[in-house]
Image: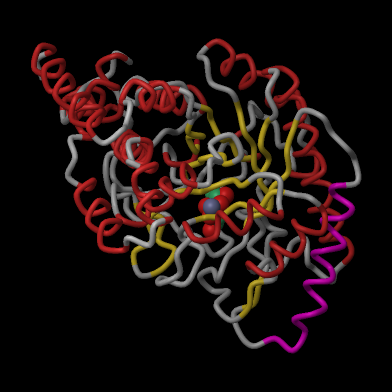
C-alpha cells in the first residue's frame, strides 16, 4: 500500500473520529503499549525440545500436517522472529516448560532448572521480547488423566516438584527482564467417564497448588487456567472454572481465561468485570473455538472484539495480560501467528477507538436507542485507516502485504525443512 494513501486515509479518519470525541493519536499511543504474549507452541504444534518424542496428550490436539514445522530451538526462534517482524508493536514470548534448552540431555520435568532457560533469557533480551512461562503437565509418561490431583503420592509429588521448579524459572526470567514473568498453571486433570469422587480430586488439586505456591516470589506472577473438558476427559475437569475462581479469589492469584474453555454461548468478555473486582489481574488465552476447544487461529470476530472492548471499558489495560493460545498445524504456521496476533490487535484498535464517553452519556441519560445506534455506527467508522497507520509507523507490512512476506519465508526457509 502506498504510504501517501495510508497517510491520506488516516488524516480523514482522524478528523472523523474527532467529530465523535475520539482522539486517534491517543488510541495509537495506547495500542503501542499493549504487548501480546505470543505462544511459542504454534511454531511446532506443541512439541517442545525434550528428547523423549512423546505425542501430545492431556486432552488437547493439534490437527493437520502442513510442512515446515520448527524441529529445533534455532528453527523455532527463527520462526518467531519472522512472525514478530510482521506484527506491529513490542511483544512478549510465552514459553512452555518443554521448550527448555536441554541439548542432548534427558532432563525430566522434575529436574528442570533456570539454567535450561538461560539461553531463552539471553535471546529474549537480545530480541526485545520479555518472557512468560507455563508448566507442562501433558505429553509425559506420568501425565495420565491426573497430575496435580493424582491420588498416587509419587505421581502427585512429581508434578508438584515440576510446577515449583517452573515458578523458580519464571522468577529468574522476571528478575532478568526487570518485569514479572506471568506463569500459567494449566493441568488437564479430569476423567473420561463418570466419577464418584469429584471432591477428592479437587481437594488434592487445592492442596497441591497450596504447596506449589508456598514460596513467595517477587518477579513472577501466578495464574491458573480453568477448562470445561478435554478430549478423552469429557465427564469431569478437576480445575473447572468454579474451582479456579474460588481458588484464585481465596489465594489472591490470577485466573487465566482461555476463550476456548467455556460453553459455546458463554461470553468470556462478560467475565472480566467480575474477576477484576475480586482478583488482582487477569490473564487471557485468546483463541478461537470452533464447536469445541479446537484452538483455531484467532480472527477478528465478535467474541474477540467484545473481549478487547471490555478490557478498555473496564479501564483495565494494566491489569489484563493478553496471551494467545492456538495451534493450527494445517496452515502455514508463521502465517497463523501473524493472522491471529494482528486480528487481536485490530480488535484492540477498535476497542480503543470506541466513542465511549458519548455512549456512556447516552446510557446515563437512559437513551437506549441512541446508545444502540452509535454502537452500530461505530462498527463502520474508519478504524482500519488508523490500524494501517499503526502498521506503517511500526514499520511492518500494511494490509495484506504480509501474505507475500510469509510466502517468501516459506519459500526460503520452512519449505526446505524435510
Ligand atoms: C489447554 C490450555 C492450555 C494449552 C497450552 C499449550 O486447553 O488452553 O493453555 O493450550 O498450555
Ligand atoms: Zn489456554
Q: Quadrant of residue 28?
A: top left
Q: Residue furthest front?
A: 365
* Image quadrant where residue 138 sits: bottom right
Q: Is 212 included in the stretch rendered in magenta?
A: yes
Instruction: Please say whether residue 206 is one of the residues in the magenta stretch.
Output: yes
Q: Is residue 303 above or below residue 46?
A: below
Q: Is residue 91 left or right of residue 153?
A: left
Relative image position of residue 377 (x, y in whole percent)? 19, 49
* Residue 286 x, y percent position in the rendering: 45, 48
Q: Is residue 210 left or right of residue 343?
A: right
Q: Main secondary structure of the magenta part?
A: helix
Which residue appears at 88% of the width and 38% of the height?
216
**Residue 256 vs residue 25, the one in the foreground:** 25
Instruction: Name which quarter of the figure residue 27 lies in.
Output: top left
Give the quarter of the figure containing the N terminus: top left
Q: Position of residue 107 (x, y in %)?
A: 73, 37
Extent of the magenta region: 195-213
Foreground of the two, 63 or 375? 375
Q: Is residue 174 visible?
A: yes
| Residue 354, horizontal then vertical, whole percent | 33, 41
Residue 207 relative to residue 98: left or right: right
Quadrant position of the C terminus in the picture: top left
Amino acid at each position: 500500500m502506498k504510504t501517501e494513501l495510508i497517510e491520506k486515509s488516516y488524516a480523514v479518519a482522524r478528523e472523523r473520529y474527532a467529530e465523535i470525541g475520539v482522539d486517534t493519536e491517543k488510541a495509537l499511543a495506547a495500542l503501542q503499549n499493549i504487548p501480546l504474549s505470543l505462544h511459542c507452541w504454534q511454531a511446532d504444534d506443541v512439541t517442545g525440545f525434550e528428547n523423549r518424542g512423546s505425542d501430545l496428550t492431556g486432552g488437547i490436539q493439534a490437527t493437520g500436517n502442513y510442512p515446515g514445522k520448527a524441529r529445533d530451538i534455532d528453527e523455532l526462534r527463527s520462526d518467531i522472529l519472522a512472525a514478530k517482524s510482521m506484527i506491529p508493536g513490542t511483544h512478549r514470548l510465552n514459553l512452555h516448560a518443554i521448550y527448555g534448552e536441554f541439548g542432548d540431555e534427558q532432563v525430566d520435568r522434575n529436574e528442570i532448572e533456570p539454567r535450561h532457560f538461560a539461553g531463552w533469557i539471553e535471546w529474549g533480551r537480545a530480541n526485545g521480547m520479555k518472557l512468560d512461562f507455563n508448566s507442562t503437565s501433558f505429553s509425559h509418561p506420568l501425565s495420565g488423566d491426573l497430575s496435580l490431583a493424582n491420588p498416587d503420592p509419587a505421581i502427585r509429588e512429581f508434578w508438584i516438584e515440576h510446577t515449583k521448579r517452573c515458578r523458580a524459572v519464571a522468577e529468574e526470567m522476571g528478575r532478568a527482564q526487570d518485569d514479572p514473568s506471568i506463569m500459567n498453571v494449566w493441568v488437564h486433570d479430569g476423567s473420561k467417564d463418570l466419577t464418584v469422587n469429584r471432591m477428592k480430586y479437587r481437594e488434592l488439586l487445592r492442596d497441591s497448588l497450596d504447596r506449589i505456591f508456598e514460596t513467595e516470589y517477587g518477579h513472577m506472577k501466578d495464574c491458573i487456567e480453568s477448562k470445561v473438558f478435554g478430549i478423552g476427559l469429557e465427564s469431569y475437569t478437576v480445575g473447572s472454572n468454579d474451582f479456579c475462581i474460588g481458588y484464585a479469589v481465596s489465594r489472591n492469584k490470577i485466573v487465566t481465561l482461555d476463550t476456548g474453555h467455556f460453553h459455546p454461548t458463554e461470553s468470556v468478555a462478560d467475565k472480566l468485570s467480575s474477576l477484576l473486582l475480586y482478583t488482582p489481574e487477569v490473564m487471557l488465552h485468546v483463541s478461537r473455538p470452533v464447536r469445541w476447544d479446537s484452538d483455531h487461529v484467532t480472527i477478528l470476530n465478535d467474541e474477540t472484539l467484545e473481549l478487547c472492548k471490555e478490557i478498555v471499558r473496564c479501564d483495565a489495560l494494566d491489569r489484563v495480560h493478553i496471551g494467545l493460545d492456538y495451534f493450527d498445524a494445517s496452515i502455514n504456521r508463521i502465517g497463523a501467528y501473524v493472522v491471529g496476533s494482528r486480528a487481536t490487535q485490530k480488535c484492540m484498535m477498535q476497542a480503543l477507538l470506541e466513542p465511549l464517553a458519548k455512549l456512556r452519556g447516552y446510557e446515563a441519560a437512559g437513551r437506549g436507542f441512541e446508545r444502540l445506534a452509535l454502537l452500530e455506527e461505530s462498527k463502520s467508522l474508519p478504524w482500519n485507516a488508523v490500524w494501517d497507520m499503526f502498521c506503517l509507523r511500526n514499520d511492518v507490512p500494511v494490509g495484506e502485504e504480509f501474505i507475500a512476506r510469509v510466502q517468501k519465508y516459506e519459500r526460503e526457509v520452512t519449505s526446505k525443512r524435510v
